[in-house]
Each structure stands twice: as structure tokens, then as C-alpha cells.
Image (cartoon, rainbow, N blue to C red):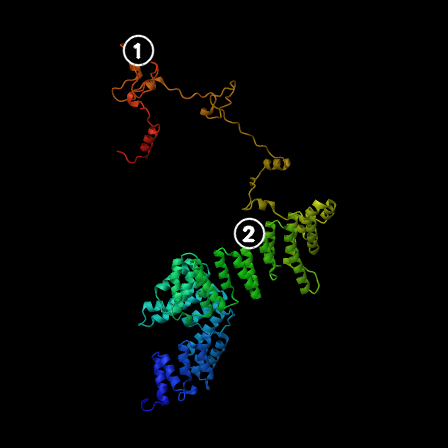
Amino acid sequence: VLQISKDDVTALQCKVVCLIQNGNFKEALSVISTHTKVLTSDIIAFEKAYCEYRLNRIENALKTIQSASQQTDKLKELYGQVLYRLERYDDCLAAYRDLIRNSQDEYEEERKTNLSAVVAAQSTWEKVMPEDLGLREATYELCYNSACALIGQGKLNEAMKKLQKAEELCRRSLSEDSDVTEEDIEAELAIIHGQMAYIMQLQGRTEDALQLYNQIIKLKPTDVGLLAVIANNIITINKDQNVFDSKKKVKLTNAEGVEHKLSKKQLQAIEFNKALLAMYTNQADQCRKLSASLQSQSPEHLLPVLIQAAQLCREKQHAKAVGLLQDFADQHPANAAEIKLTMAQLKIAQGSVTKACMILRSIEELQHKPGMVSALVTMYSHEEDIDSAIEVFTQAIQWYQQFQASQTRGANPKSPVHLSLIREAANFKLKHGRKKEAISDLEELWKQNPKDVHTLAQLISAYSLVDSEKAKVLSKHLPSSDTMSLKVDVDALENSHGATYVRKKAGKLTGDNQQKEQGQGDVKKKKKKKKGKLPKNYDPKVTPDPERWLPMRERSYYRGRKKGKKKDQVGKGTQGSTTAGSSELDASRTASSPPTSPRPGSAAAVSATSNVIPPRHQKPAGAPATKKKQQQKKKKGAKGGW
């Protein structure tokens, strides 16, 4: 037809639609652009906008839709999708509401799903409290979007239940189709399981989350956006550990088309993690390059400058890091508080505690906060600068006094935080010997609450160190012991489970014993002591041995065991060896005979009365003394037997 009539509108329109159906969006746009005179915006606006949308030219698609003279239903549908991709959620919500209100066809369920997706995105990225749309969660897509909205609100347990319901609905709906395999079902469930793992990670169940993330990656889903999010979350679990695994996971975040699948905040978080990973892997240049790129994209964002400062600190350039943070604080006063806190931390790490205190005191919006006051007082105390610590207390108390006066139109009631600061200041002053200053603080506290016995006791204690007469006068205001006595059941307290001493219950008294007990009153009956048992051979006339309590070996008169002669005369050698007694019975050896020479290896000649050691039992000269011990050890450690 086009060969006969190249400008035939119907033929051109059919050709564009066919190209779109085949996924040839660029060629379809080329046909539209070459026949602009014939294919006007009124005729081909939807097809042109759809091609631009599919080619991720979102801004161009929006212009094409807005330039159309007539807004058809299909253009409105595409307009809602375009607004969602541009993250203009308020306009998108209004567009879908209008569509649902003014259309009745078989696509109503899809429109409701898209509407719930917009509400979930608002809750997640803009922290907007979602309104109840009254949608019946009959499909797993609606359940999933509802769970995402709950995650944005921080309701993690409720969100997990919704995801479990979505999983059940998904399995049920897909299993009805006989052509769908188990692998197809698992692939469809991957996004639900990914969100479940994210909830586990937020709840601190990192091991469970990591296991589920890895299961999803093994399935190799085709959604590059899902893979990128899971890889990023695994990197956040690894942190500075398992860096090799994190490097592999980073490649999944660089896949083609990821930037069109994720929101701006998701992409930004991935880039932040890339910069941190480069820092942990000592890629200083790469870290600086990534953080500088992030800072140029979001000049007011804190993280890029914090990453740069952290990298400088790793390179031992603390002064340069502090200078970088100071420049950022000067350029962006709105974020100065967080930056100055980081600067103070760096100064503390360098040992410059006083300079850190100066930086902290320059944060006007935080200097009166109890946490900041506590930190400054602790740091000044560490530096033994008590005057500065008291000055911090004084400034904070004055700030609360002025704030309270402005809120109550000149009245002078004290807030709980104000009173707490005054009490802490008084305790600090008492601790460091500033008694008079502490007394003035305690008097102010007592004026606010004259019934506070604790404050009065502190005040009396402080005055006792300075003015004893004043302490005596104030002590008259203390309540009497009768009024302070607590109504406590002593018996119940002593018999309670947590009592360290439990009084034994007395047995029931009957008859004469009961009368005796009542007559004696408080007189306690003494227990008779049992007489100690004496030994059987005890003789009262003999003085007991004073060393009888000591072991026998430790007593002064112990001389060791006496070896029996008969025991020594028993032959211990091999067969045929002689003992010392055999030489005495030999008649051929007389007293006049000369002594025999000692055997080789034996000691010097001994007298006839001493014991002679058989040759086999003699130690050779120079033999080690520990041989016998080694043999004993071997015997002890031997295993088995006959």
C-alpha cells in the first residue's frame, strides 16, 4: 500500500503499530519523525509517547502526552506510568484515582495494583503516612504493595505477615495453570522473598537474610533491578569483611538497564556503598572519584563528604579531614550539626579533647541538650577543667530557664529536664568541693518542692560541711521517724523468696509449755553445748602433744621411717647374686683378709657392715639420674596387657 501511496495515513499507522508489537521502538519513532506532516500529534500521539517511554526517554514521553490535543484513556494510562517513573507520586496518585473513577473495563484490577504501588512508594521514599484506599487484597500483587507500605512505616512484623500471604496467593494462582513449572513459580516469588530477606536484615537476623539472598541469586532471575538490590544488601551485610565476595556482588549492580529499574534513592545508596567498598579495599583514588561524583550530584548530602573525610583519616591526614568538614559546615549550615559532631570525634581521636569541647559547644541547637551537657562535663572532668564543666551546667540551666519563661508568659515553673540539670550540677559541685555553689542549687530545688526529703537531706549534708548551725535549723524540717516509718509486714518480708535471712517458724506450743513461754516473755532458752568426743587412749594425767594437729612429717621430733634389717636382707638381684649377709657367713674370709678392690663403676670401698649393692643394681658412672623416672612413666602410659 505504501509503495502505491507513501503518505497513506492508515498504512503508516499500521506500520508503526506492527513495529511496536515487534519491539522495534526506534524504527517506529523513525517512521513517525519522517512523516510528521501526515502523522500529526492528534493521530499518533499515543504511539510516539509509548515508544519514547519504552526507550527510557521519560521526559520526552511526558512532553508528547501533554502536547496532545485530546487526552484519551490510553494516554491517561501512559501518563500515570510516566509520572511514576519520574517519581512525581502525588500527581501519579491523582491520575490513577481519576482513571479508576471514570473507567469501567477488565483492567480495573491492574489500575488498583498501580495505585497501591504509588502509595507504597510514597511511604518508602517520601515517608508519607499512607491513607487507607479500601482496596481488597485479593491478589498477591496488592498484598506485596501493602507490605511495602508497611515497611516504609516501620511495621516490620505486619509487613512480614502480608508477604507470607502474598507468597501463598502467588503459589495458589500460578499452580492453577498447568503450563507453569515450579521453576517459574520460584522465579515469580523471587521479589517477595527478596523483600522478606530485607525485613530480616532490618530486624538484625543477618544470617537468615544472607541465606535467603543467596538462594535468590542462585535462581538467576531475569530482573536486573532485583539482582542489583540483593547484591547491594549483601554488600551492606559484609561491610569491611568478606571483601572478595563484595567485589563480585558489585558487578551485579553495574548490569545494563539497572538505572531504569530502580529509584533515585536506590541508585544513590548503591553508589555510596561502592565508594565505601573502595575505601575498605584501599582503593583511595577510586574512593575519591566516586565520592566526588556523588557530591557533585547531591551537593547538600552528608555522606559523600563523610566518606572523603574517612578516606583522609585512613591516610593519617586528620588535619585535612577536619578542614574538609569545616568547609562543608560553612557552606551548608543546615547540616553543620552532624558535621561538627564528626569533627569533634576526630579531635578526640587525636587526643585534643579541649578542642573537641569547643567544637561541640559551637553547635547552638544541641548545646543545651542533656546528652550534650553530659558529654561536655565528662570530657572537661577528664581534662580536670572543673570551671568549664560548671560553666556548661550554668549555660544549660539558663537556657531552660529562659525557654520556660517564654512558654509560660513570665511564670517560673521548672520542667523535669531543668530540675534534673540543677540536681546534677549540685552533685557535681559537691563532688569537686564547690560547696557554696552546690548549696545555692539545692536551695533552689528545695524551693520548687519543699516536700522533697531527698533534696532537703542533701542540703543539710552540704550545710554540715560549711555551717553546722544552719544544718541544725534545716534538720527541724525533716519529718519525724514516726511519719517516715513504712507500713511493712516484717514477717512476710523475712519469709519472702528474696530474703537472705529467713526466720524459722516456731512449732506449736501446747499445755504447760505454752504457759511457760507466755510467762517467760522475752527470755531466750540457752542451748546446751555437746561435749566433744575424746580419743580411746586418752590419759588426763599426760599433757597432750602440742604438735598433734600437725602432719607427722612437719613435727619437730620426726626422724623419718626406719628401714627394717630383715627387709633389706631379702635378695633383690638376679639368680646367683649374693647379698651382704653371705660374705659374713663365708668362713674363708677372716677379719685379717685385706678388703677387695671395688668393682668398676662402683663408689669407693665401704665398710664390712654397710650394705653392698649387687653389680646389676649399681648405677654406671655418669648415668643420668632421670632414667628410673622415665621407666616409670613408660610403665604408667602403657596400654593393654596379656
Figure check: 437 above or below 304: above
Figure check: 468 above or below 253: above
- Which secondary structure lies at badge 2? loop
Q: Say which quadrant the N terminus sits in.
A: bottom left
Residue 556 drawn at (x, y percent): 48, 22
Residue 176 drawn at (x, y percent): 34, 72
Residue 628 drawn at (x, y percent): 33, 28
Dot 1 surroundings within 10 Å: few (below 14), some, or many (20 or more)?
A: few
Q: Which mark is residue 594?
A: 1
Residue at the image point whose x is 30% and y is 36% from the top = 639
Residue at the image point whose x is 51% and y is 66% from the top = 301
Point out the residue furthest to the left here: 576
Residue 162 drawn at (x, y percent): 44, 67
- Which secondary structure lies at badge 1? loop
Inter-mark Cα distance, 2 to 1: 91 Å
Q: Is residue 424 visible?
A: no
The kind of residue tagged 1 is Pro
Residue at the image point whose x is 67% and y is 59% from the top = 398
The kind of residue tagged 2 is Gly
Q: Which mark is residue 351?
A: 2
Left or right of 342? Residue 137 is: left
Left or right of 324? Residue 49 is: left
Q: Is residue 95 visible?
A: yes
Viewer-proximal residue among 554 and 283? 283
Q: Say which quadrant the C terminus sits in.
A: top left
**N-term-proximal mark, 2 vs 1:** 2
